[in-house]
Amino acid sequence: MSYFVANFAAQFAPVRVCFGAGVRRQASEEIARLGCRRALILSTPQQADAAMELAQEIGDATVGVYTRATMHTPVAVTEDAVAHAALVHADCLVAIGGGSTTGLGKAIALHTDLPQIVIPTTYAGSEATAILGQTEKGLKTTITDPKVQPEVILYDAELVRTLPAALTVTSALNAMAHASEGLYARDRNPLSTLLAVEGLRAFADALERVVAAPSDLHARGETLYGAWLCGTVLNQVGMALHHKLCHTLGGSFELPHAETHAVILPHALAYNNRAAAAELTPITEIFGGSNPGATLHAFARKLGAPMALRDLGFKEADIERAADLAISRPYCNPQPVTKEDIVTLLSAAWRGDPPAF
Ligand code: NAD
């Protein structure tokens, strides 16, 4: 089946992408290729060792290592990092880590326009987008700006070998959520659909192999390939109900990012399958079954993903407020969004039941 639609616009960012086990060792060449000589390396505190190792690898072109990247990109950390980048006269950024570290690099770039090299270690996909989410005083906001789009991505399968099994699965479901909602995005185009389908296929092929053998570099590489494709879809088209719910639960109830995506995805897809069954067909073609929500619910369970919002610390008493927040600003979604339906969806997700729709 062709993914042609009669009217569409497509835009791709000029990003250099390199794949390969050990490709992080190419960072010095990529710094030089950008015309830069003074790199500031970024990481979370948990990945400081990986950052220090990279700094040594880069050698003289390293002018600093900043290891305070934090989930949801707090503005206070960004301000401190921007000051640090100025202090060491950095002329480029090298972020090694997941979406939190990538987010810090993007936030610094927003203020300084410094070019970014990202070396992803999860499947979140932020490295492929011009989107930045940041938090200030408990409020999470999202902006899209070409300044935050990273210039170079080095996908090194060796680095995801250390991703814990639980985060491997939830992060993969986070990536698959970008592709899944891309299938029914109002502004989708034939290429975004191709990327989404191939991204989902990559995870269908490789994720179980990675869970069975976390050091399987070929399978790890294929999951990174899926992450790149799914992240590129996120950069191309608008997201809908699933992302709105996760944004609400993460931003206002402090639920963990990847785990929340993993729990909500089957429920959101079952909800939207009523209005977008044809668009979601690739999911059942790839993963089997007849309802994409039920299919991904079974897939997630088989891989040991968290299944219930209550296990992530979300309180049943907060369901009403979350539903109010999730419907407070209208957005495009295939199936009309009502508070009653969202309460039903969240209640099933809270208990860990199969999708209610
Ligand atoms: P993360 O970056 O917060 O990583 C979670 C933890 O795992 C951290 O402690 C990290 O140091 C550690 N870790 C990461 N990779 C590891 C590895 N290979 N080995 C061992 N430990 C590792 O988690 P995430 O899910 O990648 O990112 C979540 C953040 O990214 C959220 O703030 C989310 O909003 C953002 N995000 C943004 C976009 C975008 O396009 N702007 C897209 C997706 C996610």
Image (spheres, rainbow, N blue to C red):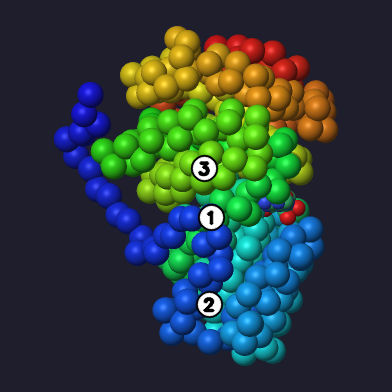
> Position of 47 compared to 176: left or right?
right
Residue 272 x %, y %: 47, 22
First in residue order: circle 1 vs circle 3: 1
Residue holding disc 3: 218
> Position of 208 compared to 3: left or right?
right
**Residue in the image at 82% along x and 33% along y:** 313
Residue 284 visible within the image: yes
Residue in front for this viewpoint, 6 or 12: 12
Q: Against 115, is 208 above or below?
A: above
**Residue in the image at 70% along x and 25% along y:** 304
Residue type at the position of mark 1? Ala
Circle 2 residues within 10 Å: few <14, some 14–19, many ≥20: many
Circle 1 residues within 10 Å: few <14, some 14–19, many ≥20: some
Measured in 3D between alpha carbons, the distance from the residue under mark 2 to the one under mark 3, in whole angstroms, is 24 Å
Residue holding disc 2: 28
First in residue order: circle 2 vs circle 3: 2
Q: Are marks 2 and 3 in contact (CB under 8 Å)?
A: no
**Residue in the image at 71% along x and 64% along y:** 50
State which quarter of the image contains the N terminus: top left
Instruction: For marks 2 and 1, give the one nearer the viewer.
Output: 1
Q: Secondary structure at mark 1?
A: loop
Residue 234 visible within the image: no
Q: Secondary structure at mark 3?
A: helix
Residue in front for this viewpoint, 46 or 346: 46
Q: Against 85, is 94 above or below?
A: above
Residue type at the position of mark 3? His
First in residue order: circle 2 vs circle 1: 1
Q: Secondary structure at mark 2?
A: helix
